[in-house]
């Protein structure tokens, strides 16, 4: 499937990537690692409206699984995470480690769970109140599941990309400008943007290729790409314990006396370059009640959502209850449509039909941290080889959604 007739290896390319989340940054990083990349003729710019990893790539959970969806992409991206961690010291720099994962049913402060099968519960899984555990069903093991700190990973890859010649501009892309060219029809010409330092001053950034990797904001630049933008609140807690928190990622259903039933995800995290202690990250389920703000930096954190989340998780863990809240946050993810657990819907990765030099990579939904490096590698191949080589991702072609 040759996407581009241009001789990619010798022609000057000026690639502008809109969005400094995991997808945009992975694309920049893998472009610089491509065998055909030549900084003398290939210019790469990332345009980011707020800061690197300002959206869900900085505030998401960071769970990785080789069994994630879609099957045509997830195993490749899971292996790339391992490769990146080995090559760049990801264990220390961004907390890459293998984990257990489980679906759990918990009952907060109502410790009469005669129905729990205690034999299923791992011995080192002692940072939840043992009486609260009603059921424990493993869904992942260290052989197929891992985690990263997405903010640290995205920023580390951005730094590596910059060291290899990528220019990162903090500025808001306002529009894509097109040009008609001889026999080949419409093609991209430039991106209009306002630099953060001069927000009133709109200026053009010439481009031969434009990759729109703006997460849920992609629809603002490409209205033909229809997306939902569910919002997720999350928080980071310093647990009150001197003991190690076992690496169990939990997809929980918690019944608590104050809140009722809530389904948060709970992710213990190792010490990292932000915190000299282990932390527990937890996120609330998606909410569809809020409109997308114009920039990630303008996202409003709703106190009542955070309170609900904290009360729920506290009700099943004394180390959380007696711990310290060190961050509260909210972000939006790009979703093509609502879907069942495990159902494959997107992401959208590839050339925008009918416009030469225009590429889109969005709709990564709940698996964007896991799948971001894979999308970045494939996008670099599409741009510099003219086709995706590391995986058959024809099912993700934008023509299916646009
Ligand atoms: C609560 C929560 C938990 C999650 N947990 C996990 C998990 O455990 N594992 C997993 O794999 N995934 C998880 N995800 C999903 C994952 O975080 C996202 O799919 C992924 O981060 C999307 O990355 P992205 O680069 O496509 O978009 P984003 O991270 O949204 O990045 C887009 C970037 O584009 C910038 N931008 C937007 N418009 C413009 C513009 N006009 N000009 C310039 N810049 C612009 C934004 O500022 C932003 O930085 C979670 C998501 C949420 C909300």
Image (cartoon, rainbow, N blue to C red):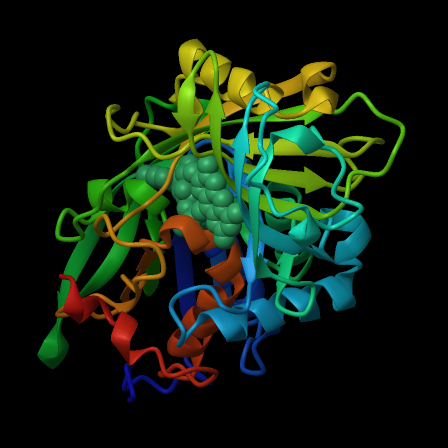
The residue located at (69%, 52%) in the rendering is 119
Front residue of 298/356: it is 298
Quadrant of the image containing the N terminus:
bottom left
* Quarter of the rendering containing residue 12: bottom left
Instruction: Point out residue 331 in the picture as x, y percentages from the top left corner.
Output: 42, 31
Q: Position of residue 95 (x, y in %)?
A: 73, 49
Asked whether 361 or 231 is in front, the reply is: 231
Q: Nearer the viewer, residue 346 or 43?
A: 346
Residue at 57%, 68% (x, y): give it.
78
Vertical placement of residue 342 versus 39, above or below: above
Q: Nearer the viewer, residue 268 or 117?
A: 117
Q: Is residue 310 above or below residue 373?
A: above
140 on left or right of 87: left
Q: Residue furthest front?
A: 114
Q: The C terminus is located in which quarter?
A: bottom left
- Residue 20 in view here: no
| Side (left or right) of 55 relative to 362 | right
Image-quarter location of ligand 1: top left
Q: Position of residue 10 (x, y in %)?
A: 45, 84
Res 93 visible: yes
- Marks counted in the figure total 0
Tell me which corner region of the image, top left, top right, bottom left or bottom right, holds residue 262.
top left
Image coordinates for residue 164, horizontal then vertical, percent: 65, 62
* Rendered residue at 41%/80% (across/down): 11
Residue at the image point whose x is 62% and y is 33% from the top: 281
């Amino acid at each position: 499937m040759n996407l581009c007739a241009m001789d990619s290896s010798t022609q000057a390319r000026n690639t502008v990537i809109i969005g400094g989340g995991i997808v945009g940054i992975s694309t920049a990083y893998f472009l610089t690692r491509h065998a055909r990349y030549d900084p003398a003729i290939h210019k790469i710019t990332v345009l980011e409206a707020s800061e690197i990893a300002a959206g869900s790539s900085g505030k998401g959970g960071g769970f990785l699984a080789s069994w994630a969806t879609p099957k045509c992409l997830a195993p490749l991206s899971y292996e790339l995470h391992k490769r990146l961690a080995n090559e760049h010291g990801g264990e220390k720099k961004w907390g890459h480690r293998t984990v257990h994962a489980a679906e759990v049913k918990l009952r907060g402060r109502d410790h009469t769970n005669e129905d729990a099968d205690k034999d299923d519960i791992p011995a080192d899984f002692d940072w939840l109140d043992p009486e609260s555990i009603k059921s424990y069903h493993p869904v992942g093991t260290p052989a197929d599941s891992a985690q990263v700190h997405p903010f640290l990973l995205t920023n580390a890859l951005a730094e590596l990309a910059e060291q290899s010649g990528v220019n990162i501009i903090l500025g808001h892309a306002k529009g894509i400008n097109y040009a008609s060219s001889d026999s080949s029809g419409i093609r991209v010409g430039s991106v209009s943007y306002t630099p953060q330092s001069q927000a009133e001053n709109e200026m053009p950034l010439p481009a031969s290729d434009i990759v729109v990797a703006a997460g849920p904001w992609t629809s603002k630049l490409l209205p033909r790409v229809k997306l939902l933008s569910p919002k997720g609140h999350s928080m980071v807690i310093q647990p009150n314990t001197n003991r190690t928190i076992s690496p169990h990622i939990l997809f929980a259903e918690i019944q608590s006396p104050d809140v009722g039933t809530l389904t948060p995800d709970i992710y213990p995290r190792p010490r990292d370059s932000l915190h000299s202690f282990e932390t527990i990250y937890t996120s609330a389920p998606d909410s569809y009640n809020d409109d997308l703000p114009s920039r990630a930096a303008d996202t409003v954190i709703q106190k009542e959502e955070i309170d609900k989340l904290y009360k729920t998780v506290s009700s099943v863990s004394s180390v959380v209850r007696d711990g310290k809240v060190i961050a509260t946050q909210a972000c939006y993810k790009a979703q093509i449509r609502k879907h069942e657990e495990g159902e494959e819907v997107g992401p959208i990765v590839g050339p925008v039909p009918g416009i030469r030099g225009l590429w889109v990579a969005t709709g990564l939904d709940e698996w964007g941290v896991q799948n971001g490096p894979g999308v970045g590698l494939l996008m670099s191949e599409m741009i510099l080889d003219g086709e995706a080589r590391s995986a058959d991702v024809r099912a993700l072609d934008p023509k299916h959604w646009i």
